[in-house]
Image (tube, rainbow, N blue to C red):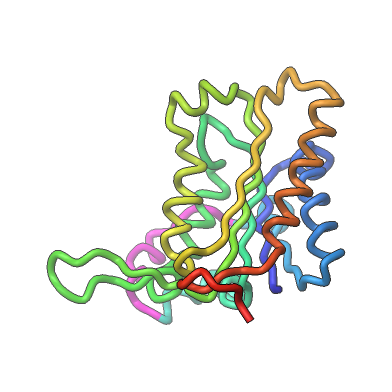
């Protein structure tokens, strides 16, 4: 198992850090190989520049500005996102990572003829985990539509191997959550990670060899 963890939070020591450490502990205990991209710590530039936009469809030249991130994406068979939900969606830093790294001929294939849509390009990824924290309540997040969850589980999920295994865990009301509630959520994170680590499935649903 080769897991790429994309971590996005500006402050080390936040509860998101505890979520990250819990996920990494479970992965490493299982013997998984891991790579972590800490977007804030490494100063990732989330803005798609004018030159990158101009060369967006020029593969493989389009990957040059983010070659190291693309290499990690191509290496992994498991993709994990850990981030805070801000305004019901992804932080700008993480959205920028999607914009700049999930490129044509890397994450998806462009249409070949008029009227066609894009085709998935990440069929080597067979597991995805999404772990987030929310200031809003569960019902308010769902009332708005949970755009962050939908972007990752549905949008990025569409690009993965058919029937890829997916897990999601969110803690809500972060601004008023007590120590016991946060501790309980870390147990949920560990359980969800263990579920992700379990046997993957092929498109027919049989256990992978």
Q: Is residue 15 above or below residue 77?
A: above
> Mostly what secondary structure, the magenta segment?
loop
**Residue 48 included in the magenta stretch of the image:** yes
* Residue 145, image x, y percentages: 43, 31
Q: Which residues are magenta?
A: 45-59
* Residue 21, image x, y percentages: 82, 51
Q: Quadrant of residue 114?
A: bottom left
Judged left or right of residue 98, residue 128 is right
**Residue 137 included in the magenta stretch of the image:** no
Q: Is residue 18 above or below residue 172?
A: below
* Residue 62, image x, y percentages: 42, 74
As drawn, which residue projects farthest toward the front? 206
Residue at the spot 75% in from the left edge and 68% down from the top edge: 34
* Residue 123, image x, y percentages: 48, 73
- Nearest the eye: 37 or 160: 160
Judged left or right of residue 130, residue 25 is right
Residue at the spot 82% in from the left edge and 67% down from the top edge: 30
Q: Quadrant of residue 176?
A: top right
- Nearest the eye: 42 or 25: 25
Quadrant where the N terminus sits is: bottom right
Residue at the spot 54% in from the left edge and 56% down from the top edge: 97
- Nearest the eye: 101 or 79: 79
As drawn, which residue projects farthest toward the left? 114
């Amino acid at each position: 198992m080769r897991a790429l963890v994309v971590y996005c939070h500006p402050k080390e020591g936040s509860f998101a850090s505890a979520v990250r450490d819990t996920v990494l502990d479970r992965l490493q205990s299982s013997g998984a190989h891991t790579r972590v991209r800490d977007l804030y710590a490494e100063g990732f530039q989330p803005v798609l520049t004018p030159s990158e936009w101009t060369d967006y469809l020029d593969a493989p030249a389009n990957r040059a500005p983010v070659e190291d991130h693309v290499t990690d994406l191509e290496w992994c068979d498991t993709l994990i996102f850990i981030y805070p939900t801000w305004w019901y969606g992804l932080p700008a830093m993480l959205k920028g990572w999607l914009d700049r790294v999930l490129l044509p001929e890397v994450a998806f294939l462009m249409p070949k003829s008029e009227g066609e849509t894009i085709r998935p390009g990440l069929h080597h990824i067979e597991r995805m985990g999404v772990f987030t924290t929310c200031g809003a309540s569960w019902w308010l997040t769902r009332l708005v539509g949970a755009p962050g969850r939908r972007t990752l589980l549905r949008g990025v999920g569409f690009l993965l191997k058919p029937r890829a295994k997916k897990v999601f865990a969110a803690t809500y009301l972060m601004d008023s959550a007590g120590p016991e509630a946060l501790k309980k959520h870390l147990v949920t994170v560990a359980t969800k990670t263990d579920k992700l680590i379990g046997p993957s499935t092929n498109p027919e649903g049989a256990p992978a060899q």
